[in-house]
Amino acid sequence: MAAKKNAAAPAPTPAPTSTPATASAAPAEKVVKEVDPNAVPLAEICKELGIAGPVARRKLRAAKVNKDGRWIWQKGSKELEQIKAILSAKPEPKAEAAPAVKQ
């Protein structure tokens, strides 16, 4: 007969420790950003023109629009009018390749 090996019992897992609550664990205060009343964000332009934000950003990147870190323009500015013109322009239809002729 084969001798049985003594199987080692699995090591007990330690009980989870709880971290005592500290006074410094207060919830962070929300930072309120000042909004320029003359600023027009891209989201507002998208709502006005009825297009999705990602589509608008894709079009603006393709047109290499210069933005100063954010998609915001001043009301009545030339840049805002250019942005609206770019976004409202219909895309040119892609030229279809002629079908291959089999002989």
Image (cartoon, rainbow, N blue to C red):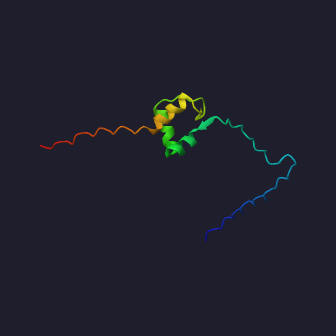
Q: Is residue 71 left or right of residue 10?
A: left
Q: Is residue 16 left or right of residue 64?
A: right
Q: In the image shown, does 51 or 80 lie closer to the viewer?
A: 80
Residue furthest to the left in view is: 103
Q: In the image shown, does 59 or 44 lie closer to the viewer?
A: 44
Q: How many marks?
A: 0
Image quarter where the N terminus lies is bottom right
Residue 102: where, in percent of width, then height? 15, 44
**Residue at 27% over, 40% down:** 96
Please determine whether, in this image, residue 98 is positioned above or below residue 14.
above
- Quarter-wise, where is residue 13 in the image? bottom right
Q: Is residue 7 left or right of residue 57?
A: right
Image quarter where the C terminus lies is top left
Q: In the image shown, does 44 or 14 lie closer to the viewer?
A: 44
Residue 91: where, in percent of width, then height? 39, 38
Please determine whether, in this image, residue 79 is positioned above or below residue 42.
above
**Residue at 54% over, 45% down:** 47
